[in-house]
Amino acid sequence: MSALVRLSSKLAADPELNGLDAQRGDLVDEPDQLRAAIVWYDTQKVTIDTDSDEHIPTVRLRRIEPLGLISQVPAAVRDAVDVAVEKRTGRTPIPFEDVTVDGFDPDQLELEE
């Protein structure tokens, strides 16, 4: 879990904004599949640690549009993500196809509501 940013676990109730609801069946039937989505987000709140005066933002997902399985993501989207990752990190990104989630346990995630 990031020590710098928290993630709100709430999703928009509006099916026009929350594309995950339409994916429910696939998520249940194929929980191990790695998927991609485009998200819109903002800051829901900022928590201030009074001991350190550190400001910790909590990000709220405002909209999520699933793109499908990683293998189904259009090349133009993969290329745009690669450019963004390289710009942010200064490093050549790992290709989508090489990302695995071995050992990932969603029950160990600590999401703030």
Image: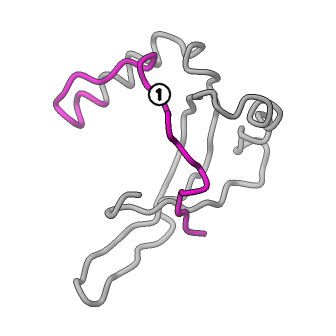
Residue at horizontal 29 percent and vertical 24 percent from the top: 93
Percent coordinates x, y for residue 75 in the rendering: 47, 10
Residue at horizontal 24 percent and vertical 27 percent from the top: 86
Left or right: residue 105 compared with residue 66: left
User: Is residue 111 magenta-colored?
Assistant: yes
Q: Which range is magenta? A: 85-113
Element assignment for label 1:
loop
Task: Give the residue at the far right of this rendering.
Answer: 25
Residue at horizontal 78 percent and vertical 50 percent from the top: 14
**Does residue 65 sit above or below 40 in this rendering?**
above
How crowded is the residue under tag 1: few (<14 C-alpha within 10 Å), some, or many (20+)?
A: few
Give the main secondary structure of the magenta stretch.
Answer: loop
Q: Which residue is mark 1?
A: 100
Left or right: residue 27 compared with residue 37: right
Kind of residue at disc 1: Thr
Percent coordinates x, y for residue 105 in the rendering: 56, 47
